[in-house]
Image (cartoon, helix red, strand yellow):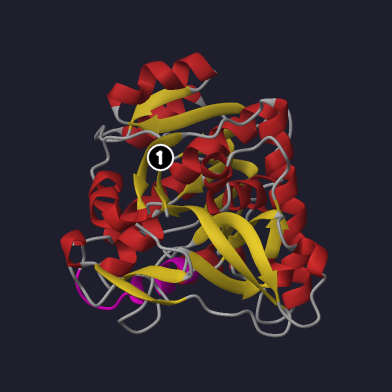
Amino acid sequence: MNRTGELVEIVLPGKVEPEGLATRRGPVPAPGPGQVLIRTEATGVSFAEQQMRRGRYYDQPPFPFVPGYDLVGTVLTTGEGVDPALAGTRVAALVKVGGWASHVVADAADAVPVPAGIGAAEAETLVVNGVTAWQMLHRKARVRAGHTVVVLGANGGVGSVLVQLALAAGARVIGTASPRHHEALRAQGVLPVDYRADDLAARIRALAPRGADAVFDHVGGRGIVDSWRLLAPGGTLVSYGSASTRDAEGSKQWPVLKLLGRVWLWNALPNRRRACFYNVWAGRTLSRDRFRARLHADLTQVFAALGRGEVSARVAARLPLERAAEALRLAESGTVAGKVVLIP
């Protein structure tokens, strides 16, 4: 258990099985100028951590480090230059690493207030997944009512939020998933397709003979070509991952670089379709203020959609932080719907 005044962190020491994660304890850090100290109430297990433990995430830091892509918690103390009134506020933060800890120091400008009435675990499910889905749908593909969209992995962390936001926007949604999830998808209004079907592209094309206005592909690999061919004139392909190479050996950068190369080539061709590779961190280096403004605006929109009932917070399981190995195994099993949440 976390004692008062003690920091508890889960450390990824190297390329290990989930049971190789280590627990580290120490003093709670103090926030510096422009920072806040957050007592973590919920952090999650996403695909990023699954890739990181394999050493396969594109720009992960060198081992050892504390994983944890995002978190929700309460501001305990503020550093110099930060409004002291922020203390006691529940906030969400996108951190990429460091979230699997009882206490996290973050820049105050990166903390987004969580509306009253939303639980920490529920809010956690929509931080990185919600921002990713919202920005791809509305900033990249600009989906509107009447559009037909294809979501690969419609029952996944990002995919399930994409489906709900697209339906709320008035789009017709075709989603790939394993058959055990098809009934739930149909209940939402999604047209499900078995992602393991040999003729997957043909089955999707039969449901959208004129092509799709947007395709969201987290798989990458050779299948990205099929996703491009599914587009209707004026359609947009949004590639946002390379899940097909999760267990591959060799360079972790190469799959992403190949995707970027394909996107560049397709956009250079004389056609009426468009492709883009989405990265939630894009633009942060060039303009941190603009990045933060978009993050605040878009996550606020996602929380508002949750409040309106357009999006549901799907918590697959809640486990104590010290059981991170079990949580990681569960998330990697592919047997759960929603996000596995760690509670410090």
Locate residue 71 relative to residue 222 in the image: left or right: right
Residue depicted at 26% across the width and 44% down the height: 330
Say what secondary structure mark 1 lies in.
loop
Q: Using the image as rendered, state which of residue 133 and residue 235 is in the foreground.
A: 133
Q: Considering only vertical position in the picture, is 226 above or below 244?
A: above
Query: What percent of the width, then of the height, locates residue 293?
Result: 78, 64
Query: What percent of the width, then of the height, locates residue 73?
Result: 58, 55
Residue depicted at 39% across the width and 60% down the height: 2
- Give the magenta-colored segment's residue range: 249-260
* Rendered image quadrant of residue 233: top right
Whether residue 40 is visible, yes or no, is: yes
* Rendered image quadrant of residue 325: bottom left
> Where is mark 1, residue-wise?
153
Q: Considering only vertical position in the picture, is 196 above or below 244?
A: above
* Rendered image quadrant of residue 231: top right
Locate residue 213 relative to residue 116 in the image: left or right: left
46 within the magenta span: no
